[in-house]
């Protein structure tokens, strides 16, 4: 599948923002946050900023962005529509949490409830994003039980690294935040490894013989293509990445997305206030680069069944 | 609405005979001509006479080589929307632009509602939907919905443009829900098949398989093979004359 940069940027940026909202709501419920309403404002600003930039960038993928509002209508059947609704719905309790904390001067009671609802909606949004891909039987690498969980776990992992940065900015690096980042990064690494192992070992589901229905007559081979230059279907669905390249990129993605941020976050236990901010910023940047690579691979490694008509033997 | 009708009154679709399709592209050309002025209009082309021509077409004609036991044959394979009974392209649509008509089962895109997210093209197993880069919306076969019910056309023209154009009669149009319709009868008789039925989209269109080859040169058993041709002559005068000519000419 063609890796569209707008979609890669959208899923990684909004994923991190949503992950941050989940941890913010949860940590607040457990009473783990610094008792400063400004922390609430700052974190919500970053989280919703990332979500908004992501949503905005996703509209660049559209042919008619001015009609994007129509995408809220078909939640009964469409995961994309559900994602749009869930993402938009997440704004309300998230804003209510930050504003309520500031105005009431208290982050318990209804404010904590708003944070919890925001966390839940953020989780639901991460799940709906994953389901857009996981629900497509035409793309074997996406139509996997681990696809949606991976979107949730990677969102939570990048959100946890962001949470470490938020806390470092307020000169507060508790051990729970470090542990949270390390465990969620480890979970991210495990789920991606399992996912890659699954798509590597899975057998192709269909052949060109099945796609044309001519396999019973003999070996089917494309002779004349229907057009001289690639059409939309080939441009969109026919993107291929070399096996060697993919292998290397997977290693880079793992190191940048999981290993480097984990090491940097651990170092924050020993660092001072300014050093901690620098470490956290570096961790966020590394995780972002790694996840962009991971997301690029998610598209580039996915084969679409329609390419059977265009010369792929099995998909 | 992108939720599917439980049942459609008709199942209009195409029956494509792979045995007699000659791959002339007349159906594709006729489709493009009609639809660039009809429901799907415009069916944009980008750089049509340049180095990298690219455009939205609703019908594509592939040619495949089928080989078995050392012999091979060419099968031309027209590919367009199959108007599935349970089309995933419709259910994934976030805007309701894609829909399946309850009255006849035709799958359509409302060009005024489509946001061009392309998700429907990802959901289609058959590569039947093509994005119009100039219009920013998705295009697909309409089964010539603007012809088949059009009272301004003569009765014989109220069929899809591709069917009307086919010079060999390899394309038929009709209602697959009616077991007595011509398409249902031919399909039953010649074992018409659906593409990738295991994916569960229940395509309506059917393909008629190529008939077994009948010419003596390629028949599997008892047919005429180059190796079977007599290597030695029968000793007649004519044969000796040819042998002498062969000897002279190869000198």
Image: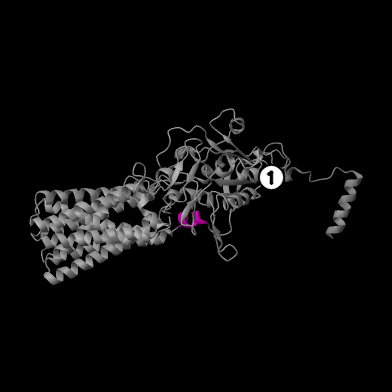
Residue stretch in magenta: A231-239
Magenta stretch: dominant SS?
helix
Q: Determine if the magenta segment contains residue A221.
A: no
Asked if residue A306 lies left or right of residue B192, the reply is left
**Residue A234 painted magenta:** yes
Q: For the residue carrying disc 1, how many other residues have a C-alpha within 10 Å: few (<14), some (14-19), or many (20+)?
A: some
User: Badge 1 sits on which subunit?
Assistant: B
Please state which of residues A71 and B69 is positioned toward the viewer in this rendering. Answer: A71
Is B99 situated above or below A179?
above
Instruction: Identify which residue is drawn at 9% across, 51% down.
Output: A108
Q: For residue B176, which quarter of the picture? A: top right
Kindly identify the residue that appears in the image at 29 percent across and 51 percent down: A150
Q: Is residue B52 visible?
A: yes
Location of the N terminus of chain A (image quadrant): bottom left
Q: Residue B180: image x %, image y %?
A: 59, 27
Q: Residue furthest top?
A: B180
Q: Position of residue A311 (x, y in %)?
A: 53, 52
For disc 1, the marked residue is: B167
Numbered disc 1: secondary structure: loop
Examine the rendered structure and indicate whether residue B98 appears above or below residue A91. above
Taking depth in this image into account, of B45 and A102 the one nearest to the observer is A102
Give how far across and how far down residue B137 sits, in percent: 46, 54
């Amino acid at each position: 599948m063609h890796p569209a940069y707008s979609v890669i940027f959208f899923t990684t940026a909004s994923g991190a923002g949503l992950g941050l909202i989940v941890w913010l709501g949860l940590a607040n419920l457990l009473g783990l946050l610094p008792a400063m309403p400004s922390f609430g404002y700052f974190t919500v600003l970053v989280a919703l900023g990332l979500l908004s930039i992501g949503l905005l960038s996703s509209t660049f993928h559209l042919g008619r962005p001015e009609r994007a509002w129509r995408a809220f209508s078909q939640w009964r059947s469409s995961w994309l529509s559900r994602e749009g609704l869930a993402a938009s719905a997440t704004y309300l309790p998230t804003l209510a949490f930050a504003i309520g904390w500031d105005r009431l001067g208290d982050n318990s009671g209804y404010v904590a409830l708003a944070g919890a609802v925001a966390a839940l909606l953020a989780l639901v949004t991460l799940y709906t994003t994953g389901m857009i891909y996981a629900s497509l039987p035409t793309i074997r690498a996406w139509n996997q039980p681990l696809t949606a969980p991976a979107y949730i776990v990677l969102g939570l992992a990048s959100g946890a690294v962001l949470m470490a940065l938020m806390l470092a900015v307020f000169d507060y690096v508790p051990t729970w935040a470090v542990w949270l980042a390390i465990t969620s990064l480890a979970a991210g690494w495990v789920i991606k490894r399992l996912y890659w192992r699954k798509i590597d070992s899975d057998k192709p589901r269909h052949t060109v013989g099945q796609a044309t229905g001519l396999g019973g007559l003999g070996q089917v081979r494309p002779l004349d293509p229907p057009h001289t230059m690639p059409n939309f279907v080939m441009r969109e669905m026919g993107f291929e990445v070399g096996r060697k390249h993919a292998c290397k990129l997977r290693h880079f993605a793992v190191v940048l997305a999981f290993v480097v941020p984990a090491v940097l976050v651990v170092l924050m236990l020993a660092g001072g206030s300014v050093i901690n901010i620098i470490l956290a910023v570096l961790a966020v940047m590394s995780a972002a680069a790694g996840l962009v690579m991971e997301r690029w691979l998610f598209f580039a490694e996915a084969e679409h069944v329609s390419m059977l008509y265009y010369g792929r033997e099995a998909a | 609405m992108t939720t599917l009708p439980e049942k459609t009154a008709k199942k209009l679709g195409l029956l494509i005979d792979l045995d007699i399709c000659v791959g002339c592209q007349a159906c594709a050309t006729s489709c493009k001509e009609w639809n660039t002025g009809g429901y799907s209009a415009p069916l944009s082309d980008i750089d049509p006479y340049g180095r990298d021509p690219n455009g939205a077409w609703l019908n594509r004609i592939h040619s495949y080589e089928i080989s078995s036991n050392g012999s091979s044959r060419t099968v031309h394979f027209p590919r367009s929307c199959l108007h599935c009974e349970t089309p995933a392209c419709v259910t994934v649509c976030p805007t309701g632009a894609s829909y399946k008509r309850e009255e006849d089962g035709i799958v359509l895109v409302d060009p005024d509602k489509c946001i061009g997210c392309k998700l429907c093209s990802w959901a289609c197993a058959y590569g039947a939907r093509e994005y119009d880069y100039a219009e920013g919306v998705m295009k697909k076969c309409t089964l010539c919905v603007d012809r088949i019910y059009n009272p301004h056309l003569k009765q014989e023209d109220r069929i899809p443009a591709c069917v009307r154009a086919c010079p060999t009669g390899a394309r038929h149009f009709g209602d697959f829900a009616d077991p007595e319709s011509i398409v249902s009868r031919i399909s039953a008789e010649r074992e018409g098949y659906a593409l990738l039925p295991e994916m569960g989209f229940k395509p309506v269109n059917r393909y008629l398989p190529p008939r077994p080859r009948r010419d003596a040169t390629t028949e599997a058993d008892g047919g005429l093979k180059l190796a079977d041709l007599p290597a030695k002559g029968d000793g007649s005068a004519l044969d000796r004359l040819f042998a002498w000519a062969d000897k002279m000419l190869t000198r």
